[in-house]
Amino acid sequence: MPRVLMPIGDAVEALDTFYAYYRLPEDGYEVVVAGPEARLYHTVLHEIPPNPDVPWDITHERPGYHLRASAAFRDLCAADFAGMFVAGGRAPEYIRYDKDLLRVTREIHAAGKPIACLCHGIEILAAAGVIRGKRVTTVPKCALDAEQGGATYVADPCVVDGLIVTGRGYGENTAVLRELIRMLRGASPR
């Protein structure tokens, strides 16, 4: 069964993560969850609360489910994966400094394998240098991260550029996963 890498850390966004975690196996792909260490991680619900009576300008995080990483970033080899899915939440802000995560991200990209990314996950792709010259989307507050990574930020829900598909957030799960699965099957990117 072809394998898809899913890097996580504490405070990875629950909906970003679990949609792909359960959706990819439905099409015959094994999801390999990896983190800074092979251990149990905390997910979060990461959103701006929709209560107009109490304005909130930044994302609020509430505890979500837990997910176990079966591998540490240092033990990953790009040749073991058909592609990569990067979730958002607060985790990317911290794990983007992991040299082994950046290494395997670059290797997957250099091998011409598809990468899907939602929300704050763009921070990892920018840090790895794999979005330079690409058109991408993300949540508006991460547009600067995308641009500092050499990409052109596009305020669209889902953007495909070559073998990279990006979405603003969990609302784009269906569109992003549809494109990733098409790419994993070997269809030409749109």
Image (spheres, rainbow, N blue to C red):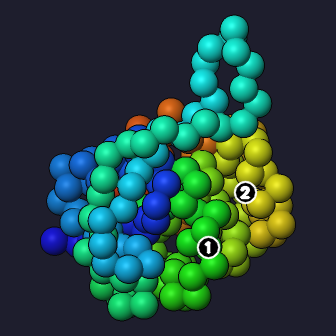
- Indicate the secondary structure of the residue bearing disc 2: strand
- Label 1 element class: loop
The numbered mark, 1 or 2, whose residue comes first in the sequence reads: 1
Q: How many marks?
A: 2
Amino acid beneath label 2: Arg
Instruction: Please tell me whether mark 1 or mark 2 is closer to you in this view.
Output: 1
Assess disc 2: are there few (<14), some (14-19) or many (≥20) residues with their C-alpha within 10 Å of its C-alpha.
many
Residue named by callout 2: 135
Q: Residues within 10 Å of mark 1 (few under 14, many from 20)?
A: many
Q: Which of 32 and 178 is in front in this view?
A: 32
Reading the image, the residue beneath label 1 is 96
Determine the residue positioned at 31% across, 53% down. Answer: 66
Q: Please tell me which residue is depicted at 65% across the width and 37% down the height of the picture.
A: 59
The answer to whether residue 21 is above or below residue 47 is below
Quadrant of the image containing the N terminus: bottom left
Q: Do the residues labelled 1 and 2 touch (CB within 8 Å)?
A: no
Residue type at tag 1: Arg
Q: In which quarter of the image is residue 42?
A: bottom left
